[in-house]
Amino acid sequence: MILQSLSWRIGLSFAAFVLIGSIALVFVIDRQVARENESRFAELARTNAAFLTRAKLPPSPYLDESLEQVLGCRVDFVTTRDMPLDEHSTTPTDGTVYRREGREFVSVPVDDTTALVLSREVTASWTALRQRTTLSILATFWLLSGVSGWFIGRGMVHPLKSLAAQLPRIESREPLALDVAQRKDEIGDVARAFVATRSALQEERESRERAEKLAVLGRMTTALAHEIQNPVAAIGMHAQLWKREARDQAEASIAARIELESRRIDDLLSQWLFLARPEPPASSSIRIGALVEECIEATRAGLDHARVTVTFSAVDEGRIRGDAKRLSQVFRNLIVNAIQAMPRGGQLDIDVRTRPSDGLVLVSIADTGVGFSEAALARFSEFFFTEKEGGMGIGLSVATEIVRAHGGELRVHNLPSGGACVMIELPHEGNDEGIDASGNA
């Protein structure tokens, strides 16, 4: 299948172009030579007619023979009296060269009654091929065509072959040397597109490999989180029992601290499990104020230890429908964040109320800490974004996702007086019947 090669197809097309161009060039040259010959033939007739007129030589057979020997063509004198009998009776006398019966004629008037007629055999076609000038022109054309063909092949076929040779290496990780990518023409565009595609494929492959590794790591950590939850729950339960049976305040404080830290571990595990395998929230009727108050009491030991004073108010709180466990995770996480934002103690204001204009239940958690940075205000809901040393950057992200899963919205802003405020908006259930914050009827 050699004719399927680009080099052969271009070569045959170029050879056909050269052949057709050569034939056209010879035809043009031949026509030009024929016109020049006719022009010289007509000029020869006019020059001799002018000479005869000036010399006043009368036409005669002797004069005909003499001129034929000198001019190398047949010479005839035609008079008006001979026209009805002579073969030249229709000969025009305007010096125009015309052809008839394989000969060409030209007739020029000598005087008022006589015309000089020159005739000769028509020259065979393609006589221009025998001329040295024509051969020189053709040789020059062929030389220029050959040089042009070489440059075309060198400039197009060779780069395309080089590019085609690199195509099997599109999935290779080895460095790619493609000089044609430096060209400024369409072949360079194709080469650069090939290089860009190869880079994109390699990046996609590396990204897929990273994703597969992270997926394996996620499955391992999810299984590990499940395994850790059981002993953490046991630790928390025994801490509660120890706190109830403590012999003095010091033991009760230690037990409360253990209970708080075990709850924090459980919250972190719950956040990770939600991130790794999110599920739709359970639906139950919740009195949101009671749920927030329970979260405050659950973190009381941490609040007291950090010397944080809590002010809680619930005005016309109403109920919402949602998952009490997940919402507790949100509120406890926000309270712990507020405690960490006030390492030297401070004030934490928590307010729960219903907004009559749209029926939303609002939970506001405001502290007197350092507040959010500009980056945190813009990216607080992004997974793995954190400015906290040692933080994972999933607390606010998971809280935002849980609130949104309940049809609500979580917003953050800084207070003019200093500190940060987290506002949670949840849709009101619209009735006071259902189950309480603990999930019981």
Image (cartoon, grey):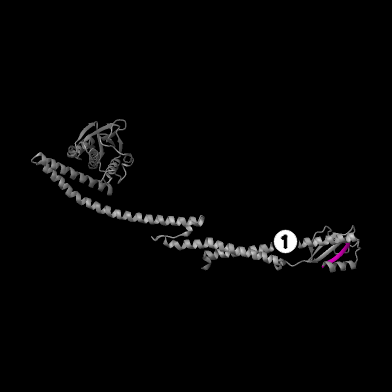
Above or below for 257 versus 155: above
Above or below for 327 versus 54: above
Q: What residue is shown at x 27% (from left), y 32% (from top)?
A: 354
Across and down, in percent, residue 210 comes to: 32, 54
Q: Is 32 part of what is drawn in magenta?
A: no
Q: Secondary structure at mark 1?
A: helix
Q: Which residue is mark 1?
A: 32
Location of the C terminus by quadrant is top left
Across and down, in percent, residue 26 comes to: 68, 64
Left or right placement of residue 130 versus residue 312 in this view: right
Using the image as rendered, state which of residue 371 and residue 321 is in the foreground: 371
**Quarter-wise, where is residue 146 in the image?**
bottom right
Across and down, in percent, residue 248 comes to: 9, 39
Q: What residue is shown at x 62% (from left), y 65% (from top)?
A: 143
**Quarter-wise, where is residue 408 in the image?**
top left
Across and down, in percent, residue 381 comes to: 31, 42
**Quarter-wise, where is residue 433 in the image?**
top left
Q: What residue is shown at x 21% (from left), y 34% (from top)?
A: 310
- The answer to whether residue 21 of the structure is visible from this angle is yes
- The answer to whether residue 432 of the structure is visible from this angle is no
Magenta segment: 72-78
Judged from this view, the residue extending furthest toward the front is 344
Q: Is 74 part of what is drawn in magenta?
A: yes
